Each structure stands twice: as structure tokens, then as C-alpha cells.
Image: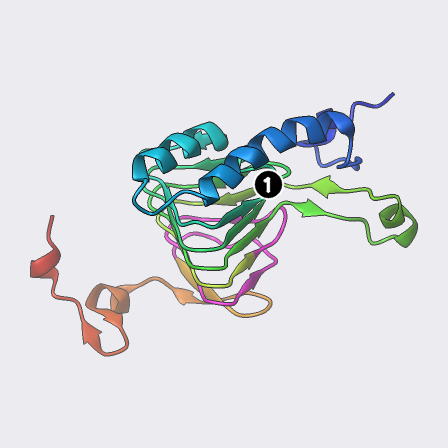
């Protein structure tokens, strides 16, 4: 018999309700449930749980509760100082990689799972998974949706409510549904942080 668990990370079709998969999945989902029941004052406990839950967890990762994840975050790999606001949803049936210093606004969804367009296959409950890669120092705006198989480069800003259906290169601002590149990050951004509000660089020097 075909080993369905072996297909989680290959992009092949498989049955996600396979007993072997479900047995492992529920262990991490229980940890996620415990995480979501923690108080904001229990920072140390949250950090300990994240290290148990996530596939890898860099220093200073902080995820506001509630956090939702198909595999309890077990296939999520967060670099250092990643911040996620409320209601992050990671459909992490395969791997999700998020680089250092990246920020995720509230209600962001990152999906790796898909289902066949052919109705007869979908009726059987079949699924496939494609990994998502998000680079370093990105800002993913509130309510954005990242689709399966997407790669986003470094220093990218994705506007609120955008649906990312194609890869994005580094150093761009991208918005919309479907998400399109609006412009490159450039000289204007060195002078202004919001509309006509200037950056006082002397105040923020290292």
C-alpha cells in the first residue's frame, strides 16, 4: 500500500486523512491548542511551546494568540525576530519558511495545500502540498493570502488584503487581487515612512 505520509512533501496527490498522518498531526495540534490558551503574561511558556510546535524557531519569534495551523506549526520554519499578529493561519501540510525580521499583519493566511480541479478526484478527498518561502525583512499586510508554492523575496511589502498568486522578487511593494508589483523599494522610502511624513534618520541611527 502507498505510504501517504511520504507524499506530504513531494507535491504528489495523497489522502490527508490517512491514519498515520492524523496520529502525528494531533500531537502538534494539541500543543497549538495549549499555546492559544496561554495568557499574554506567560511569555516564557509561549516561547517554550513554540520551540516544541514549530519545525524550527529562531530567537525572538513572537506569535500573537490565537494562531491557527493545520499541522500545529510543525512544518513552519521561522527565522529570528519574526512577528505575527492575531489570527495567523498557516495551512502547513508541507513546509512554510519565513525569514528573519519578517512581520505578518493580523488575519494573514499562508496556504500550502491544494485540491485537484477534477471533481471526481476532489470527491475522493485527495490533496497535494506545495511549500511557501517568504524572505527576510518582509512586511505582509493585514488579511493577505499567500497561495501554495509561492516564493517571496527579501524586503518585500505585500499590501493589506492582497492575494499572492505569483512569485514576488526582492525589494518591491506589491498589492491587489491578484497581487501585482506596484513599484520597487527606492529613494523615496529612504526619506518618507508614510505619505508626507519624513524620516528623522538622526533619531534612528544604530
Residue 38 location, quadrant: top left
Residue 42 appears at what percent x and percent y? 32, 40
| Residue at 47%, 64% in the rendered image | 174
Q: Is residue 53 magenta?
A: no
Left or right position of 142 against 114: left
Segment tinted magenta in the rendering? 146-171
Residue 171 appears at what percent x and percent y? 38, 55
Return the residue at label 1: 92
Residue 205 appears at what percent x and percent y? 10, 53
Residue at the left extreme, as displayed: 202
Q: Is residue 166 magenta?
A: yes
Say above or below: 13 vs 88.
above
Residue at the top extreme, as displayed: 1
Left or right position of 16 against 176: right
Q: Secondary structure at mark 1?
A: loop
Residue 132 appears at what percent x and percent y? 56, 44
Q: Nearer the viewer, residue 188 or 152?
A: 152
Tell me, yes or no, if residue 60 can be seen here.
no
Q: What is the crowding at mark 1: few (fewer than 14 residues within 10 Å), some, or many (at least 20)?
A: many
Amino acid at each position: 500500500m502507498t505510504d501517504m505520509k511520504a507524499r506530504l512533501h513531494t507535491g504528489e496527490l495523497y489522502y490527508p486523512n490517512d491514519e498515520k498522518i492524523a496520529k502525528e498531526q494531533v500531537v502538534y495540534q494539541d500543543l497549538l491548542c495549549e499555546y492559544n490558551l496561554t495568557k499574554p503574561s506567560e511569555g516564557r511558556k509561549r516561547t517554550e511551546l513554540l520551540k516544541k510546535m514549530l519545525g524550527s524557531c529562531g530567537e525572538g519569534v513572537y506569535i500573537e494568540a490565537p494562531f491557527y495551523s493545520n499541522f500545529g506549526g510543525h512544518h513552519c520554519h521561522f527565522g529570528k525576530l519574526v512577528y505575527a499578529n492575531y489570527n495567523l493561519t498557516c495551512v502547513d501540510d508541507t513546509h512554510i519558511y519565513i525569514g528573519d525580521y519578517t512581520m505578518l499583519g493580523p488575519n494573514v493566511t499562508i496556504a500550502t495545500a491544494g485540491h485537484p480541479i477534477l471533481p471526481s478526484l476532489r470527491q475522493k478527498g485527495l490533496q497535494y502540498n506545495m511549500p511557501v518561502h517568504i524572505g527576510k525583512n518582509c512586511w505582509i499586510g493585514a488579511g493577505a493570502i499567500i497561495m501554495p508554492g509561492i516564493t517571496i523575496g527579501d524586503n518585500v511589502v505585500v499590501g493589506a488584503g492582497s492575494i499572492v498568486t505569483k512569485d514576488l522578487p526582492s525589494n518591491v511593494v506589491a498589492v491587489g487581487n491578484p497581487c501585482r508589483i506596484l513599484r520597487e523599494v527606492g529613494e523615496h522610502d529612504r526619506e518618507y515612512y508614510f505619505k508626507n511624513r519624513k524620516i528623522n534618520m538622526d533619531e534612528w541611527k544604530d
